[in-house]
Amino acid sequence: MSTRLHPPDRDLFEQVARAAFLNPFGAERAALDASLAADAPKGPGDLVDRVLVRLRVRLDWLESVGRLDVTGFDDHDATLLEHAILFERFHRFGPDFERLLEAQLAAPERTLPVPFADALLGGLQSAGIAPTRAERLMALFWQMRRAYHFIDRGLVGRSEAMRALRADLWNAVFTVDIERYDRFLWDRMEDFSVLLLGETGTGKGAAAAAIGRAGYVPWDPHRRAFADPFTESFVPLNLSEFPETLIESALFGHAKGAFTGAVSDHDGAFTRCRPHGAVFLDEIGEVTPPVQIKLLRVLEERAYTPVGGTTARRFDGRVLAATHRSLDRLRADGRFRDDFYHRLCSHVIAVPPLRTRIAEAPAELDDLLAVVVERILGQPDADLCAEIRAALDRDLPPEHPWPGNVRELAQRARRVMLTGGCADPPPAVSAARDPFLGSVGAGELDARDLIEGYCARLYHQHGTYEEVARRTGLDRRTVRKYVKKAQG
């Protein structure tokens, strides 16, 4: 006979259920967590601990009287009890999942044992949760732990723009309704492509990696392990690095003999991607309309054919894409197909520029400097951070726009370490001493020479093809060609 929860337990479990299915980076979750804690917490970790203390007291009592079993309650109360149990178990085994995550990062090609699996699965099943349901919850816990880890740690910043970005990335993994995701969408996310927009150097690649590494990985009950290493679920590809003749091979692979130099079969990005994984197409604005048509086929039919091949293959993963260029301008110019754009933009995420982040939270510059310094040195160094910050304050104007964003910050930090300062190079020499400027003034250059020389000067000043492309409106490969030709 079904029973009902006591009203105080029902009230607590209803609030916990709401918290369990809210975006952990959203403002609503923060407000709800605070209401669940008995008094003002000292921080996020303390807040969760206090919620868990209250929850465990009630779950322990139910267990002591033999009622910690979801099958013994009516539908609504059974669901509330299950959610309370899941919330508690997720946090109880959080450190175990974190250790597994770090071990997998250290051994990216191995399928690792999960020593706590029996305890977690056994605990869920003893609470009346069916074995197949418990196994899928095991996979969901693993996915949520990875998503939180990579979104929280992979994206530095305390500004509102970064909080909103983290919330967007979480929704890109689990949708806005994680309960609906758990019921219907966990194995259907390949239809939800993501387009990341932002200036050069803002961290679009890091945002894509957070989504890609947080994909669903099934639990394999026969091997007592997760089906695949999550480290193999994210396949990034920078399209601007490939000449036009090789982009299709990089994407779709090629058959032996497909073209000169194709001495063996080659697997492209879509072939290398695991089921439930993601292919990240960086600089999607660089691909030509013919390639866009083939990518559109992948998105709509889940099919592609290797270059020189005759048999179509199926792609079961997800497509993530990014560009620093204005797709509206490319579409208006006929260089980016409307049908491809509309199929690609299930979720469009704007990655904020550094100037916006600093304007919202000035201390974010110091947070980023600490990360940059640790990556350069391999360990933290507060003194070096202070030295670099002093140079930035001394050599840059207060309203410096940071056109290169976080990448520019890293390069200026290196410049301080090399030279003691981070000021920009001196202004260009006069036309009398500069053959290019002299030729411009004399009207001696044709259009191609003018573009080549201008691109070369911008490259000398800014140091990256991406920044030159952004300033000129050209694509990266064209910029590189012009710069190389100007340099002889």
Image (cartoon, helix red, strand yellow):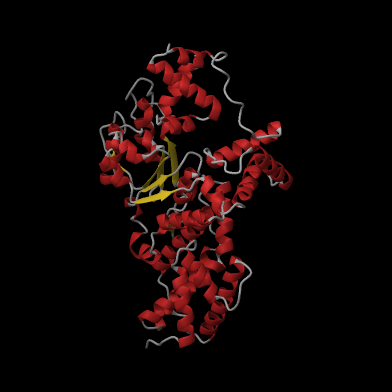
Can the viewer see residue 282 in this picture? Answer: yes
Vertical placement of residue 128 versus 329, above or below: below
x, y (%) of residue 199? 46, 41
x, y (%) of residue 36? 53, 76
Q: Quadrant of the N terminus?
A: bottom left
| Residue at image coords 48%, 17% | 486
Q: Nearer the viewer, residue 36 or 58?
A: 36
x, y (%) of residue 471? 45, 32
Q: Nearer the viewer, residue 385 or 89?
A: 385
268 left or right of 162? left
111 left or right of 294? right
Can the viewer see residue 297 in this picture? Answer: no
x, y (%) of residue 213? 47, 50
Quarter assignment of residue 250: top left
Q: How many marks?
A: 0
Q: Nearer the viewer, residue 227 or 427?
A: 427
| Residue at image coords 59%, 25% | 427
Vertical placement of residue 199 versus 176, above or below: above
Q: Nearer the viewer, residue 481 or 441?
A: 441
132 left or right of 431? left
| Residue at image coords 52%, 75% | 35
